[in-house]
Amino acid sequence: MERKQFLAPTSLLVFFVLLLTNCKTKSDSDEDTLLLLAAAASTRICANSSFTGTTVVNSTATLNASTDCITGMTSSMSADLPAWIRNNFKCAVGSVSGSNYVFRSQNIPNNKSFYFGSTSPMYEALAGGQKSAGNNQIASQCLVYTIPSSPSEKLTNKTGTQSGYASVGITVNGLAIFNNAAAAPDTLATEAQTFDKFNGHPQSSGVYHHHSQPLNVSNNNSNLIGVLIDGFAVYGRDCTNASNVTSTPTIANTQLDSNHGHSTTTLHFATPTYHYHYSDDPTATIPTLIGSYFHGTPGTVSN
Ligand SMILES: [Zn+2]
Ligand SMILES: [Zn+2]
């Protein structure tokens, strides 16, 4: 009798471990971590009660023409944020808290996607040759980013971008940035086959994210794409002091360090300032928004 009671949960556990193992080949390394966290916590609690906004229901999701965010998403940037954030970021709530910028994001893309599901007004078929990321669908999140407002370089013992972060940065349209890795033996080149027409896809808990350039933000140009959790900005393929330039040559990897970055002036920084670029990545084997390491000391992300 006692043995029977012991066996039942054990076989459940074995089943669950098998389930996780089977999922692994389909997910990113960071996505495995999220799956484990989701298993550990039965309820998800937003880290701050001021995190408001309705949960987006995919079947009725529409784009709000005035905010250019999905209706029901909270979008505001506080007046004390620097202009490069205040004037460029949306579809999230940004504020300053001590020596950090804080972003809260429901993380719903303001672009059409296959991953809203076929009954959604925001649905769009995948491009030819692409395939679905399993049954994954976009879902509202409670992402809270705490990002140092005065980024500090960390040139020794660099922090890896594949260290289990819920997200390694936030795009100007409020979306999660994921690292340059996929679960072995896949590379991101394989995973890229599941990107929607805007280069994003959701992982198993519905966190829509970009490893690659978000195509409604930047398309091989010099646009600001977002900020990584170490506080350094990430730009598109090009590096100029003007926005939306597509005619100049893309920046060569030889002009960047192994973390996809360098220090120059940009449209937003009048003095030479470190920033990342969307660039070729030897680990991913496709261009990505970040390499294997942060240039600075990362802040924190919760979901
Ligand atoms: Zn991914
Ligand atoms: Zn640059």
Image (cartoon, helix red, strand yellow):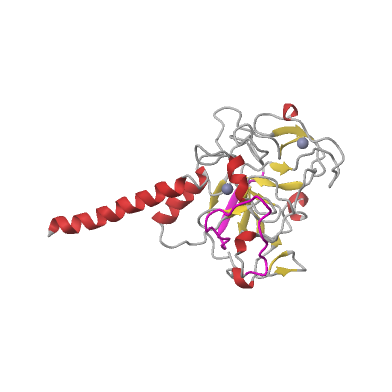
Report if residue 299 is visible in the image: yes
Which residues lie in the magenta part?
Answer: 120-149
User: Could you tell whether 141 is left or right of 73 in the image?
Assistant: left
111 over 212 or under it: above or below: below
Tell me which secondary structure the magenta stretch mostly adopts: loop
Furthest residue to the bottom?
A: 60
User: Could you tell whether 198 is left or right of 154 in the image?
Assistant: right
User: Could you tell whether 222 is left or right of 12 in the image?
Assistant: right
How far across and how far down the image is residue 23, in percent? 45, 49
In the foreground, 166 or 148? 166
Which quadrant is home to the N terminus? bottom left
How far across and how far down the image is residue 213, in percent? 70, 46
249 over 57 or under it: above or below: above
In the foreground, 187 or 38? 187
156 over 57 or under it: above or below: above
Report if residue 53 is visible in the image: no
Residue 228 on the magenta span: no
- Report which quarter residue 91 is drawn in: bottom right
Q: Residue at the spot x=50%, y=43% of the render?
A: 29
Q: Residue at the spot x=73%, y=69% of the render?
A: 64
144 over 147 or under it: above or below: below
How far across and how far down the image is residue 5, in percent? 18, 59
